[in-house]
Image: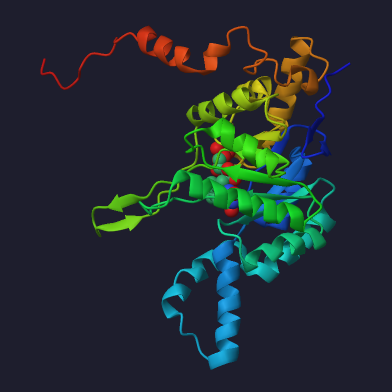
Amino acid sequence: MSAELRTTYLGLELESPLVASASPLTGELETLRALEQAGAAAVVLPSLFEEQIEHESVEVHEALEHGTHSFAEALTYFPELDDYNTGPDAYLEHLAAAKTALGIPVIASLNGVTPGGWLRYAELAQEAGADAIELNVYHVETDPYNSGAAVEDRTLRLVSRVRSTVSIPVAVKLSPYYTAFAHMAERLAEARADGLVLFNRFLQPDIDLETLAVKPGLKLSTSDELRLPLRWIAILHGRVPVSLAATSGAHTVEDVIKLLLVGADVVMLASVLLERGPGCLRELTTGLRAWLDEREYASVEQMKGSLSQIAHPDPAAFERAQYMRALISYSPGVRDRSTPR
Ligand SMILES: Cc1cc2nc3c(=O)[nH]c(=O)nc-3n(C[C@H](O)[C@H](O)[C@H](O)COP(=O)(O)O)c2cc1C
């Protein structure tokens, strides 16, 4: 008997822990079908952004009030976003079409930071058939007078608001940059988040030295980025009553296995799917099953969390002791190439 790959995420029963994360691949019906056929157990649609929705309502208001756009400056960067997901109405249409076309759960993604008018889109997404909402709170706090506590409170209020608006599960996709991440995770659970998606990849801007302009720098991830979600999922598993999704740096079968071992309920994939195409899900599914069979695990459920911090014989492995061990274990084998021969 081959190992059982089923897992539960946000209360949804999934055939396997492999989920297609939000990316342009989940923005098209054709690629969504290909993802399902290759073995994605659920899909997260690209985000609909707070700015897009708020902008649209301002635009409509302006047109009705003045017959013109007086927010010209704000309008300049929205056409680019509209190229990404074609705006709020088309987003809901895409969601409804995805639900019709696919047999697997479809998770809608809302991306924003302030409780506002755009939140009714959580309700509209539910009406359009979303099986769950992923709320991405990507934010860079630059105001020197805004404290961490204030930012956290705002996020918690937002999550509570979404949670009380819809009856479908809500997951929160977060950055790792919290002083006390475990506490924030606990407070999110108290705010009734059903799951945490760890972590948002922060895309740091770069400088173009030709034009002296700040340019966005999107590079796909590598497996090296896996260690951040790996550590935090290990720490939170079994401690905070939420589902845990790993995102950032899962590329290979080994990556998927490691994340499940520390306690991820699902492993979300974007870069590897963009790089290698949806077909690589077959290889990941087969590889995961083969590994479980070889180790005589009966199921993903059985191995899930067996190397999490609460289960680990050496809990310090995920804390400061490991940091010290890592520094001590480094052997400076590389010669300084800057020294002339
Ligand atoms: C081109 C591209 C577009 C993305 N769009 C979104 C998005 O709309 N919403 C979102 O929450 N994440 C988005 N992401 C982030 C991915 O869902 C994922 O969390 C991140 O890339 C880390 O996973 P990976 O290492 O498998 O790529 C995007 C990533 C890429 C590469």
| Quadrant in which the C terminus is drawn | top left
Residue found farthest to the left: 340
Q: Give the answer, above or below, for where 301 lies relative to 38.
A: above
Nearest the viewer among 277 and 224 is 224
Q: Position of residue 225 (x, y in %)?
A: 49, 31
On the picture, is 115 further left or further right than 104?
Answer: left
Determine if residue 285 is in view. yes
Q: Give the answer, above or below, for where 227 lies relative to 15.
A: above
| Residue located at (13% from left, 18% from top) | 339
| Quadrant in which the N terminus is drawn | top right
Nearest the viewer among 139 and 151 is 151
| Residue located at (77% from left, 47% from top) | 169
Nearest the viewer among 271 and 185 is 185
Q: Give the answer, above or below, for where 297 lies relative to 156.
A: above
Q: Position of residue 112 (x, y in %)?
A: 57, 57
Q: Position of residue 36 (x, y in %)?
A: 77, 44
Residue found farthest to the right: 1
On the picture, is 212 further left or further right than 227?
Answer: left
Nearest the viewer among 133 and 16 is 133
Determine if residue 274 is in view. no
| Residue located at (78% from left, 54% from top) | 130
Quadrant of res 82 = bottom right
